Image: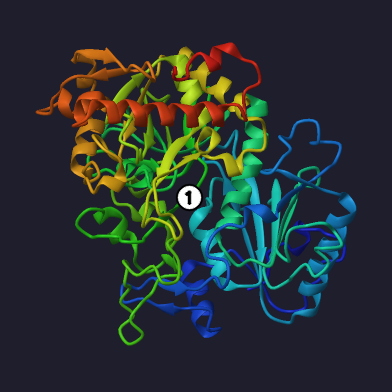
Amino acid sequence: MKPKNPSSFKLTGFNPPGNIYVNLSSEMLEEHILQKGEGRLADSGAVMVDTGKFTGRSPDDKYFVDEDSSSQKLWWGTVNQKISEKIFNELLLEVLQFYNREKTDTYFFEGSAGDDPEHGIGVRVIAKKAWQALFCHNMFIRSNGLLENAFESSFTIINASDVKNHNFKKYVMNSETFILFHLGRKLAIIGGSEYGGEMKKGIFSVLHYLLPQKDILSMHCSANVDKNNKNTALFFGLSGTGKTTLSTDPKRPLIGDDEHGWSDKGIFNFEGGCYAKVINLDKKTEPEIYNAIRKGALLENVVYNELTGRVIYNDDSKTENTRVSYPIRFIENSLAASGKSSRAEHPKKIIFLTCDAYGVLPPVAKLSSKQAMYHFISGYTAKVAGTERGVKEPTAVFSPCFGGPFLTLHPTIYAKLLQEKMNQYNVQVYLVNTGWIGASASSGLDRISLPLTRKIVHGILDGSIEKLKMIRDPYFKFRVPTEFSGTDDSFLVPSKAWENEEDYHQSAKELVKKFHKNFKLYDNGDNQIRSGGPID
C-alpha cells in the first residue's frame, strides 16, 4: 500500500528505499507489529510492546530552535531549552540518512490534533516502527476532513528512535537522546527514545504555542458532560490525582481524558484517544478503562504471564508508568462512542484536583477568580512514599497550569486566558483533594476514598454544594463547606479533622511556605494573581 500522493510530503533529502505505508488500519498495523516481533498479544486482544530504556518522557532532552518566528514568544528556560538552527540541521541530516539507508518499511500517519475544523491542526508523523504508527492512530484524530489526497500537514514529526546523538557533548546537550522542534519550519525530530508519549506531548506543546495566540486556551485537563450534552466540566490535575479516573464517569459521557482547547465556541478535545496509566488497574474500580483494553489498544511496558499473555497490572518491576493507548470510542460512555464529535459547550464547573499528602487542604473548597488563577499557576499535588522509586516522605510537587513540561509560553499567559473565560462564561472553580485529611500520608491514615470523592464531584456538578454553609480557610482563604452528604466539619474542615490542632497549624504553615517559594518562579509582578495565594 503506497501513499496515494507521495508528493504531498516534500523534504529535501528524504528518500526512504523501502515500502511506505500511509494510514494503515489498526488491524494491519497489528499484523505488522506481530510479524516484525515488535510486540505480542495480551489475552485481552490488545498489543503489548516495550519501549526500551525510556518508559517515560525525557524532558531534559527537549529543545526548541532559536529562530526568528518564535524566539521572542517562547518561554525560554529549563522547559524550553534553546538549540541553534545549525545543530538542528546536522541532527536532521542524520535522521534523513537513517531513513534513506534503512530498507525496512516506513509508516506515515496523517490526521489532526483538535476536534474542531476551525482550530485543529494537521499532524503528520513518520516512523519506522509499526507500533509507533498504531500509537498515533489511536491518539490523534483520524478523520475531520483532513485525510484527502491533498492533505497539507500543519506539523510533521519524524521519529527516528534508533538514531542517537553521539555528538551531544560537542553540541552541549544533555544526552544522546533528542526531541527537537523547529516551529518556523513546522517540523520536529525525535531520536534515542522509543517512548510513545514523546509524539503525543510534542504535538501538545505545539498547540500550547499556537492556540493562545488566537485567544484559545490550551489545557492539560480531562472533560465530560451530562447525558444531555450539557453542564460541561473540566478536571485539572497532575499524575496520581485522579484526573482520568474521575472524568471517566458512568453517569457522564467523556469528552476526553487529557488535552483540550477552550475557544469562543466552547470546549474541544485535542485527541482521538486516551493514554491511561494502568499500574494497579482494577476492573471493579475503573471498569471503563479496563474494558477499553481490547483488540486495537496498545499496552506499553506492562508485565505479563509469558504463557497466557495475562497482564499483571500491579507489577511495577519495569516501571510505575505502565500505559495503554486506545481510541476514545473504546470508552463506552463517551461522546465519540455515540458517533458525536468530541466538542461541547462552555464549561459550568472547573475542578482542580490535588493529592495533598500533608493533610492540610480540605476535601473540597470553592475558589474565587483570583484564587483560581493562583492555584492554576501553582498546579500543586504531592508524591507519597511508594508511588515513585526513591520517594520516602511526602514531597510537594508544583507544575504550572497543571502541565508545566508542555508549556511553550509563560504560565501567566494561560492563567489570564483562564480568568477571562471564567469571567465571561460565569464558571465556578473548585479545589478537590483526593489525598489525605486529618494527618499526613506518613501517619498511616487511609487516603480519601474514591467513592467519597466521586460523591463530592457529583455534588459540585449538580449544584447541591452551593446550598451548603461555608467558612473561610484560615491559610488559603478559599471557602470550605462544613457539611456534605452525611459528613461533617470533622472531615471537611482540616483544622477540626486533626486530633492535635497545633500539628495541623504547623503542617499548614510549612505547606504555605512551599506555595510561596514556588510562586516566586512565575511571579511577574501581577498583584491580582499574587493576591489569590495563601497567607502566612
User: Looking at the image, which is closer to me, 511 or 380?
Assistant: 511
In this view, which residue lies farthest toward the left? 486
Q: Which residue is rendered at x = 66% and y = 55% of the image?
A: 124
Q: Which residue is mark 1?
A: 272
Element at badge 1? loop
Colour logic = rainbow
Horizontal side, residue 83 vs residue 455: left or right: right
x, y percent for residue 198: 60, 56
User: Looking at the image, which is closer to me, 373 or 288?
Assistant: 373
Image quadrant for the C terminus? top left
Q: What kind of residue is marked 1? A: Gly
Q: Which residue is rendered at x = 25% and y = 60% of the image?
A: 282
x, y percent for residue 479: 31, 16
x, y percent for residue 75: 71, 34
Image quadrant for the N terminus? bottom right
Q: Is residue 262 visible?
A: no
Classed neighbour count for the residue bearing mark 1: other residues with Cα under 10 Å, few (<14), some (14–19), many (≥20): many
In this view, which residue lies farthest toward the right? 86
Q: Is residue 393 visible?
A: yes
**In which quarter of the view is residue 342 placed?**
top left
